[in-house]
Image (cartoon, rainbow, N blue to C red):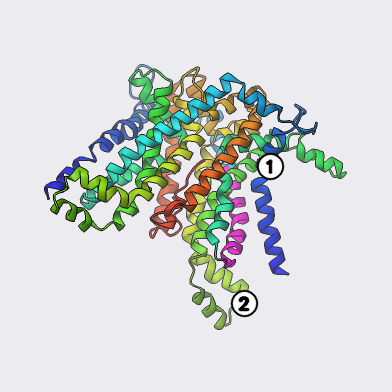
Amino acid sequence: MKSNKFIKLLSAPYIIWAIAFIIIPLIMVFYYGLTDKTGAFTIANVTSIAKPEHFKSLYLALLLALISTVICMLLAYPLALILSGMKTKNDHLIVFIFILPMWMNFLLRTMAWQTLLENDGVINNILSFLHLPTLHIINTPAAIVFGMIYNFLPFMILPLYNVISKIDVNVLNAARDLGANPAQTLFRVILPLSVPGIISGITMVFVPSLTTFVVSEMLGGSKILLIGNVIEQEFTQNSNWNLGSGLSIVLMIFIIISMVITTVYDKEGEGNAL
Amino acid sequence: MTKILKRIYAGLILLFLYAPMFTLIVLSFNASKSRAKWGGFTLNWYHKLFHDRAMMQVVLTTLMIALISSVVACIIGTVAALAMDKMNAITRNTLMGVTNIPMLNADIVTGISLMLLFLFFRFKFGFTTILLSHITFNIPYVILSVMPRIKKMNPSNYEAALDLGATPIYAFFKVVLPDIWPGVLSGFLMAFTMSLDDFIITHFTKGAGVDTLSTKIYAQVKKGISPEMYALSTLIFISVLVLLILINTLPSGNKKDEKVVKKA
């Protein structure tokens, strides 16, 4: 028992660290977000989200994040089905191949897409060589959505694959024995069973898409501002930490909402890729 | 027929995922400075890269931060995970909840919260602030990868060591640590890659004059990318590949934990 007490004491460094670098910083965000430059209490920083320029960037971020999440899901679901259907010995390796790009530096990957998508970039060179119409999507919201899908697609593939590959084959066989055709099996058996993975995937794509400022900066040509860009500029360019913190509080509300939805639907942690 | 269609679909997604990698690799050997034209094969950019002092300094800073932050995170995290295992459920769950905050919160919020902390307490922004931030977001990865190993450990081994006269410290190094080592190692590798890859949190906590690779790339993107960067990214891609093959071939506590990945 004495040794147990000693062991518990060992958590002290981490507890101190967590208080100093996780809890206090979060309190700081709320402190700055709810005060003005003189230190007086105000909710003006938070409510300034209603200002047209801020609201527009939040709306655009929500919209683009939503579009990317839906497209990611439509792309990843069939893939997860295909991958879990491949009953190979090395299924670990297959998943590994699909999530490997995720470890490549995020900025390098996005930079590469910039190169590929440019008006005189690689893709357009190939297209014009084949006498096909060229793409002009760089510096448009479409390019941002493209970048979001590219960067966050693995976050959707992984949880979907995790739940679908765990579905008992006997359940699928039972459905077939009871006369369900493949479409019915998909929509009435596999789909409901994969809800935890879907929810988890949605959060893992939606939150980073909603909060990004890098993708929009690099592929949107710094003219299209998402809420992440606005917050980033308040901190690094305008040095208006109070306003930046206030807008971050708004952003956190959206993050918390999606976290709550995830925990409610994903109680068993089945689709958990975290 | 459907099998072929399935393969084509999977292949197209793979092409989509790997296209940027191939682009960077091809461009790193491109003699022409233009991103759109192929000017013949060259190793010139690699040569220039290794003679670029400033760039090498950036690589060194990045590696130092990744190495120090993951070692410190491993020590604090492993010790904390051992202690958490002995705590009652309420304390443990509270601490786990706090541990999850940096993983679940958006990086931009984590970044600005640390920036505000450093501003408020008048830290000098630079290497130290980046390092402290990286340790902070690395500890959760270590805890989450060591935890399952500790749960699987047989507590009798440690008790037997104590009964046989070992001091707790001796028993820890001779009995406990070898048992949880794979978890610590995969936690270390994960923390290391997370640190290498991080941009957002570094962006908010770095000072002028100190750059990691990510922040350097970000700065270059605005001004125009030098082809040396393509060479460097190719080298990074190869290193990451080797690192990941290492992680995936190492025996780990739980196959599922290896998927402890979250990076945006």
Estimate the x, y position of residue A217 in percent, counting from the top left.
60, 30
Residue with the mark numbered 1: B22
Q: Which mark is residue A253?
A: none
Residue at the image point whose x is 56% and y is 28% from the top: A53
Q: What SS does tag 1 mark?
A: helix
Chain under disc 2: A
Q: Is residue B152 visible?
A: yes
Estimate the x, y position of residue A133 in percent, counting from the top left.
83, 43
| Image vertical order of residue A233 relative to residue A127, above or below | above
The region drawn magenta spans A65-88
Q: What SS does tag 2 mark?
A: loop
Residue B113 quadrant: top left
User: Crowding at label 1, few (<14), some or many (≥20) Cα neighbours within 10 Å?
Assistant: some
Estimate the x, y position of residue A45 in percent, counting from the top left.
43, 27
Residue with the mark numbered 2: A181
Chain under disc 1: B
